[in-house]
Structures are given as structure tokens and as C-alpha cells.
Amino acid sequence: MQDCVTYDRLQLDRRLPSKYRSLAHDTRAIGNELHVASLLDGTVERRDDQLWLRVKLLRVKDGALLWSDVYHGAFADILTLQDEIAERAARALALKVNSAEHRSMHRHYTSSSDAYQHYIAGRYYCSGAANERFLEKGILFFEQATAKDPQFALAYASLAACYVQLTSATEQPSALEFLPKAELAAQRALEIDGNAEEAYLPLAIARAYCNWDYPGAEAAFRRSIDLAPDSSEAHVAYAGFLTSQGRFQEAEREAHKAAELDPFSWNANTVINDVYFFGRRYGEAAEGFEKSRVVDLDSAGWYLAWIYASRGRPIPIIQELVKARAAASRKAIFTAELAYAYALQGMDSLAESYVQQLSQYPESIDDYLTSLVYVAIGDTDRAFQFLARAREKRSWRILDLKVDPRLDSLRSDSRFGELLRSVRLSP
């Protein structure tokens, strides 16, 4: 049990589905949904340098209490407390633990309670859908953890993952700024511990989306899944990568596996829509995006607008986009989306006027998306101009070049082949 202790709740696994990470739930219901026989639950309370842990082990099928205890000690002794809880839980379950499993139970990534305390704080700030401010705090805590213990592999791995999150959480998204830092942190974690499973996923993402090193990325994705086969997050990311490579059957398997592992994960349940769209299965894609547009219109609209327009149908989401833009605090994405929808309907002047408005907003829009507007308008030169900017800034979407049907009108232009080769994608 490494970082299973949170300040609200005890968790057995860092890879528990996202639904359970912050809220208290019926432990029997959780156990049934996770298909486990027993569940360790509890709470943590800290007062100054003192720690109270209240732990209970439940049998899922009937809610019977198998074991419970209260632990009190100095926060500096938290690693020892973790060992003791793991041992008591194993005995209560009458588990026969071999020597390798015993070593795993007692594995500590750090012997420094100070470093571990900073690490726990970093995990808190970087958990879930953290915003830019929280992620920056998380990075600071992880850096403090590694300063306290330079051999703390898990802190380096978590620092790498936090940098990956930051690439899309800022008002001025910059993969070029943060992904190299993610790669360095992940590599440092693996120098310390070659089996640090948490490090391989950010390493894979940095290799794929910043370095365009696809063989290296694939090796890291596979290693991540080998070490953590129950990580829905890893399967989601690998599905996205496979989609960009045009390997749709493999991507679909990974997407379904992700949803099976974490039925409540938004990413796990929507990555399949990308597989369908880029795989040109538009009926299935439209059905999925219609479901997701209720809460994710700023993303789904880019796909739905094109699907409707390509079928010669009116685009029914325009009024929704107008309302969403009026209500949103960050209006740029909906402004760009409206420009795209109007361009697809042949209303080029109106589309251009919305594009010009983008400079009014503090947040930036991915140049790849702006290029889609100019593709729809029919301004090929400006479309290539923004695609080149997206490449230079390492837009995550630039990897979709090979498979994106919205760019089909550009494929016969020699500049498109050059663009593909520049990001190491074959035509």
C-alpha cells in the first residue's frame, strides 16, 4: 500500500476508478462494482505531527466486518504504519503470501517521511480534473519530495504525470514547454527504478506527442500496460495513439478495455468515439458524440458539425453553441467552434468574423482547430499556415493528420505530404 492513504479516505490502489477517489461511497457497492471479495476502507486524521488511522476490512458479499483497528502515531512513522496495516489485512484474509508478494507489500519508494508527506500533498493537488493552479502546486510538492529524497522514483514519476496534465490545463497550452520536462522526470524515475510503472505512461506521451518517436512511444505504452494492466488511463492513452497511427482495430480493443476497467471514467467512455470517427464509421461516431455533447459540447461539436455537413444536413448544434458561448467564462473555444460550423454551412464571412474575435480572449485556441475553419472556408494557404504553427507548437492533434477526414481536401496538395513527413508520419 504505497500512496493508498489520502486525507479523506484509505484506498487500496492508486489505479482505482476515478469515481471513488474523492467521495465516500457505499463500500459494498464499490466492492461489487470492482468484482472483489474484500475491501479495505478507512479514514485518516492528522493533527500537527500526530496521525490517526481508522481501518476496517469488509467482506463484500454481506458487508461483514473481518477486521478493524485504530492506529495512532507520529506522522514520521507513516511508512511503518502502512506496513503494519498491510500485514494485519493479509492475516485477516488468511492470505498465503510468497516472498515476492511479501516484498511488494513492504516496498517503500522512500524512507523519508518528509518526502512522503510532500508526495501525498502533490498527489492531492494533481488528482482528477485538476486546474492549472492546483497542478502547479502539485508540481511544487513533487519537486520538494524529490529534493528531500533524490532517489524517490515514485515522486519523479508523479511529477512527470503532472506535467502531462498541465499541457492541456493552461490558458496557453504548451506541449513544447511541459512535455520535455515530463520526459526528463520520467527518465529520472526509471533510472532509479526500471519498474516504476507510473513513469512509463508520461514517457510514452512525451515520446509520441513531443518527439514524434513512435517506436519509442509504443514500447513505453506497452511497458506501462504490462506493469499496470488494470490502468484504464494507460489503455485510453494507448487507444488514442493507435488511432493516430491508423491502427483502428487495435485502438478499438484498447478503448473497450479502458471502459471495462473504469466504467465511470469520462475519457474511457469517449475515446471510442474518436476511434469511430477517424476510422470513418460516422454513424457510430455520431451516436457517441450526440451522447457526449450534453456535457462536452466544446469537444463533440467539432466532430458532429462535420458529420452533419458531410451528409448535406443542417447543423443542429449551432444554437447550442451560441448559448454555450454566451454563458461560458472561457469563450474562445465556442467562438472557434461557431466559426467552423458557419464555414461548413458556406457562411464564410460570418465564419471569418468569429475567427477575428479570437484575439479578444486571453485563452488560446489550438492552431489545428483554426486550420479546420480555413479548410471549411476553402482557404488552403491559411489552413496550411495554421497546421504548420500547430506542428511547431507540438499540438496534440497534429498526430491526427494521417487519419482526420476533415483534412481530406488537402491531401492532394504536395504540402500535405511534406507536413506528414515533418512529423514522421507516412502518407
Image (cartoon, rainbow, N blue to C red):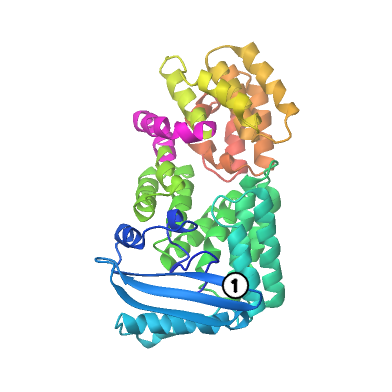
Q: Would you identify the image quadrant in which residue 11 lies?
A: bottom left
Q: Residue at x 49, y 81 (%)?
A: 71
Q: Answer whether residue 415 is magenta in the image.
A: no
Disc 1 residue type (three-letter): Arg
Q: Is residue 383 left or right of residue 242?
A: right
Q: Is residue 187 above or below residue 202?
A: below
Q: Is residue 407 above or below residue 186?
A: above
**Could you tell me what secondary structure mostly forms the magenta stretch?**
helix
Q: Which residue is mark 1?
A: 46
- Magenta segment: 274-298
Q: Residue furthest left?
A: 61
In percent of width and height, residue 58 lies at: 33, 71
Q: Residue at x 31, y 82 (%)?
A: 95
Total of numbered circles in the picture? Answer: 1
Residue 375 in view: no
Q: Is residue 302 left or right of residue 286?
A: right
